[in-house]
Amino acid sequence: MKISVLGCGRWGSCIAWYLDKIGHEVLSCGLADAPEFIKLYNTHKNDYLTYPDSIEVSSDLEYAVNRAEVIIISISSQFLRSYMEDISKYNLDGKTIVLCMKGVEVTTGKRLSRVVADFVDESKTKIAVWVGPGHPQDYVRGIPNCMVIDSNDEAVKKKLVGEFSSDLIRFYIGTDLIGSELGAAAKNVVGIAAGMLDGLNMTSLKGALMSRGTIEVGRLIKACGGNEMSAYGLCHLGDYEATLFSPWSHNRKYGESFAKGEKFEKLAEGVMTSKALKKLADTTNVEMPIVNAVYNILFENAEFKDELKKLFLRDVKNEF
């Protein structure tokens, strides 16, 4: 299968490396002036892995789109709309677009698959998402994990799962695109909260955070028309180890650094996702105290201890 991976950051480069490893014809495409692309183009290496010679590296977006049967996009979620404006200039009929990114568009509150749907005819161009746990640092060392591919098109997701599965990644067929996308996006916000607890030396609270976070995300998924049980699957709860505990989690590290008053320079998708989910929760009248706490700390200059106190002083209620 001819696959073009658009975006060559940490996760995009790992996807290209993995799909080449299992036998596909892979092109890795990035922005010509981006340091991460320049390094890959010149050396076939980055901080995480080394590309074999079989992976083609290019900054020619038109060529990358036209050659591919499957287009995988792995970029910052808030730039997806502007990126699709460029991609949609080319003929996308008969192709499948797979989103390997997690977030909700802040300006519209749309799930990322719906952003793509604004630019394509879904009867001609299929859309899927690839979510779940895992870090490049583990995959390149041969440590396996499980992930999910979901889509509104049954045939497409079954085909992708069949083509992408190996003994390194066991894929499951998703059954709830709404839940898969919202759950994957929300786990990054919970990851920031976990990092804040680490930074405040309150790591023992992360068990409660996991439990209550999953419940409130399930409520949002249900309110948006999905299956609330998706929050307990690989897209959300199943990704907690990689997001709430791993030293490689950008969102957890961002939260920890924020709590300690330190700078964290790398992308943490959960920052803007907290803003998007706050909007979505307000629109759907869903109570999301953890999301609200993260939002208030990041965007309203609220104090950590004040927000934590609010969580503990909420009205007594049944657990379920």
Image: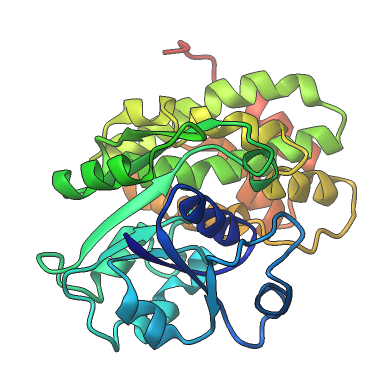
Residue pictured at 32% horizontal, 67% vertical: 115
| Color encoding of the figure | rainbow
Q: Residue furthest left?
A: 123
Residue pictured at 32% horizontal, 71% vertical: 68
Quadrant location of the N terminus in the rendered image: bottom left
* Res 178 seen here: no
Total number of numbered discs in the rendering: 0
Q: Which of 78 and 125 is in front in this view?
A: 125
Q: Is residue 8 left or right of residue 175?
A: right
Q: Position of residue 129 (x, y in %)?
A: 35, 51
Q: Where is residue 88 in the image (x, y as percent from the top left)?
A: 29, 82
Residue pictured at 68% horizontal, 69% vertical: 44
Q: In this view, does 280 lie to the left or right of 271?
A: left
Q: Which of 252 and 225 is in front in this view?
A: 252
- Which quadrant of the view contains residue 187? top right
Q: Position of residue 228 (x, y in %)?
A: 32, 29
Quadrant location of the C terminus in the rendered image: top left
Q: Nearer the viewer, residue 199 or 121?
A: 121
Q: In this view, does 135 lie to the left or right of 85?
A: right
Q: In this view, does 85 lie above or below 215?
A: below
- Which quadrant of the view contains residue 267? bottom right
Q: Is residue 37 above or below residue 142?
A: below
Q: Position of residue 21 (x, y in %)?
A: 51, 50
* Res 215 seen here: yes
Residue pictured at 40% horizontal, 48% vertical: 130
